[in-house]
Amino acid sequence: MHDSPLLISSLIRHAARVFGDQELVTRSVEGPIHRTNYRELHVRAQQLAGALIALGVQPGDRVATLAWNTSRHVEVYFAVSGIGAVCHTLNPRLAPEQLCYILNHAGDVLLFVDLSFVPHLARLGPNCPALRKVIVLSDRAHLPADPDLLAYEDLLAEHPQSFAWPSFDENTASSLCYTSGTTGEPKGVLYSHRSTLLHSFAIALPDLFNLGEHETVLPVVPMFHVNAWGIPYAAAMTGTRLVLPGPKLDGESVYQLLEDERVTMTAGVPTVWMMLLNYMQQHGKRFSTLKRVIVGGSAAPEAMIRTFQDQYGVELRHAWGMTETSPLGTFCSLTPAMKQWPTDEQVAVQRKQGRPAFGVELRIVDDAGTVLPETGEVSGDLQIRGPWVCSAYYKQEGESPTHHPQGWFSTGDVATLDPAGFMQITDRSKDVIKSGGEWISSITLENLAMGHPAVAEAAVIGVAHPRWFERPLLVIVLRPGAELEPTELIDHVAAQVPRWWRPDAVVFVDALPHTATGKVSKLLLRQQLKDYKLPDEPQGTGDAA
Ligand code: ADP
């Protein structure tokens, strides 16, 4: 067989040639609905490719984005990777210090930024010396008066509508995402052209995202969250109509777009669906075209599965993955036999994270690394391997305790595997909290709490929350004789972290449980506090989000 490289440029070239008229609809950052198609998108990606070369971007250079889901952002994806540079999506929800750390670690040379994030630039530009230019993803009329900012539309207009996409090794890096991982220090995961294309083939399959010209897909999951779970690439591969929500992700805005654009499938984290369902229930709304919702990033709660399916007739497909796995690992679709089962039994399966996609393998191991049986009862540390699972963190080659021989990667999730191949997450061994789809570093919060003079020992765990699914709880042992108001400690910690990291509550205890090696046993602590309920109002004064 001919050894053609699997390149991202081939996706957009194919989409333009074969699905040229297929639409991409954006709720733009400027406000109005914007419509384009794959043919126009390819022309503009080629103009941008010419512009990137003119701006001195070399193969392998990192080009950052700080942007919502829009067709301009999709153009940046294809142009940057298409010329052999690396498209690095930054999460705008991070604090400016974290963004600076990540920009500098990646050595980004250009930054494409949405109008919403222009205010961030004052704190970024001066502290990121490698950054040569900032391009605002808008036209000149919307740009603030700043001679250092380039308007995206001006840049495109200066360059020809055709560009000869170069050919190179399919293992070349194509995009970069950072995860906050286990220690709170962000780690980069570099995807390749090959991994991206193989992942696209996998997610497009019928029992997974079921993409194609017949589908209109609204990815609520942001393009800065593991490349919107790979949807922009797989949509171009299959000619899927895309509806991109821009900055408005509240229940009403998402509902309007789902209805107005006749969306058939949508994907995002549970918090977003909670907001959507609340809006619909309060206003008595129904879906007229939506058939399927994909839920990942955190466990899909049983009530959500039932509400979508029983009240709205929308199939919920539960998915599990990580930044390190591109992200798709497992997908929960019922077998034909299961679809004949009583509803309760079907829902019990759907609460599981599902079976591995073709291309990845899973196993569970004990502390000694021994592989455990797949009985559905025994749980162990979940490991995964496959051609879109990362082999090392960016610029940390060979140093990771999570990468093992034969390509196995430790996920930090604790899971069971059943004889039918379904995986279910039962706990998390990595020490992070996930709130509304965003990570919170428990270690950072613990260190800050320990910095308070009244605190002898501190531990932070995630506890269930109706909207954010998990919120941080401070568990504190006070120094002998010390007294401390919860609010004082929460304010002390919150002053130094992003707003959504603010702990919701403090529990004072006489002692924390410890492991044999003297570390706080989060497992025991979580068990001890499993019935703990957060107060209705956070103990601190601020907004829990
Ligand atoms: P993402 O952007 O998909 O949230 P991250 O790398 O930030 O990816 O987070 C991955 C982690 O999120 C997983 O290791 C797991 O702890 C959690 N997670 C993702 N999907 C699920 C799910 N369906 N159920 C439970 N936890 C999940």
Image: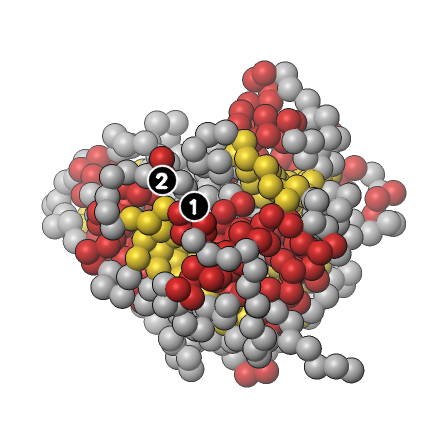
Q: CA distance from mark 2 to mark 1?
A: 7 Å
**Residue 171 in the figure: left or right of residue 417:** left
Q: Secondary structure at mark 1?
A: helix
Q: Is residue 138 above or below residue 357?
A: above
Q: Residue at x 24, y 44 (%)?
A: 146
Name the disc covering residue 344, or none: none
Please state which of residues 10 and 199 is positioned toward the viewer in this rendering.
10
| Residue 188, percent from left and from top | 41, 66
Q: Quadrant of residue 58?
A: bottom left
Rendering quarter of residue 502: top left
For the C terminus, the image quarter is top left
Of helix, strand and loop, which one carries label 2?
A: helix
Question: Who's the residue at 25% across and 50% down the image?
Answer: 148
- Residue 285, above or below 350: above
Quadrant in the rendering for residue 4: bottom right
Q: Earlier in the sequence, mark 2 or mark 1?
A: 2
Are discs 2 and 1 less than 8 Å apart at CB?
yes
At 63% across and 16% down in the image, what residue appears? 284
Q: Which residue is mark 1?
A: 153
Q: Amino acid at mark 2?
A: Arg
* Residue corresponding to mark 2: 140
Residue 236, can we see it?
yes
